[in-house]
Amino acid sequence: MYITKKKCVVGVASEYVWICDARIRVNSNLLTKIVNQFESDKNIGLVHGVPVSVNKRNNFGAKIEKIHFGGSLGRVYLAASIFGLNTVTGMSVVFPRELINTHEYQTLTEYIAEDFFMGKLIQETV
């Protein structure tokens, strides 16, 4: 899946790249807020969000997803971020375009948990 994302971001002309899974829904002003975060603090290397499930399906998998994202994951995100730990999930992530051209970014396709390693890469360079 990430290989497809990698191919999609090669021709990006904007200053920032937003990789977002198809089922993610956001407020209409989210990107403005994210860009403002980047502009206000040059130490920010990546912005991502805690996914919250509002899945309208009513099957077992949808219920488990809602419990996971709406319960334990949000708490773990908050606790880990307090201690500066890498908690990036690739469901919705924004980062500067110049990262695409680095060798390290190009090698992310080698990992199953490429979102974690992207967060680690950016955390180490900022």
Image (spheres, rainbow, N blue to C red):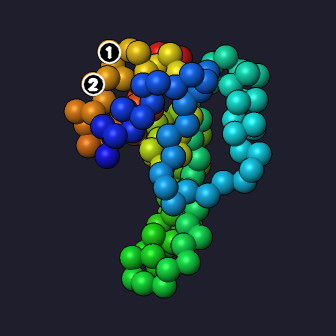
Residue density around tag 1, few if under 14, some if 14–19, many if 20 or more, within 10 Å: few
Toward the viewer: 74 or 108?
A: 108
Q: Quadrant of residue 74?
A: bottom right
- In the rendering, at what x and y percent does residue 102 appear? 38, 14
- In the rendering, at what x and y percent does residue 46 appear? 56, 30
Toward the viewer: 97 or 122?
A: 97
Which residue is disc 2 drawn over? 107
- x 46%, y 36%: residue: 86
Q: Secondary structure at mark 2?
A: helix
- In the rendering, at what x and y percent does residue 108 appear? 31, 30
- x 33%, y 19%: residue: 104
The kind of residue on which mark 2 rests is Thr
The kind of residue on which mark 1 rests is His
- x 36%, y 23%: residue: 105
Residue 60 in the image: above or below residue 91 = below
User: Residue 83, can we see it?
Assistant: no
* 56 relative to 90 in the view: left or right: right
Which residue is disc 1 drawn over? 103
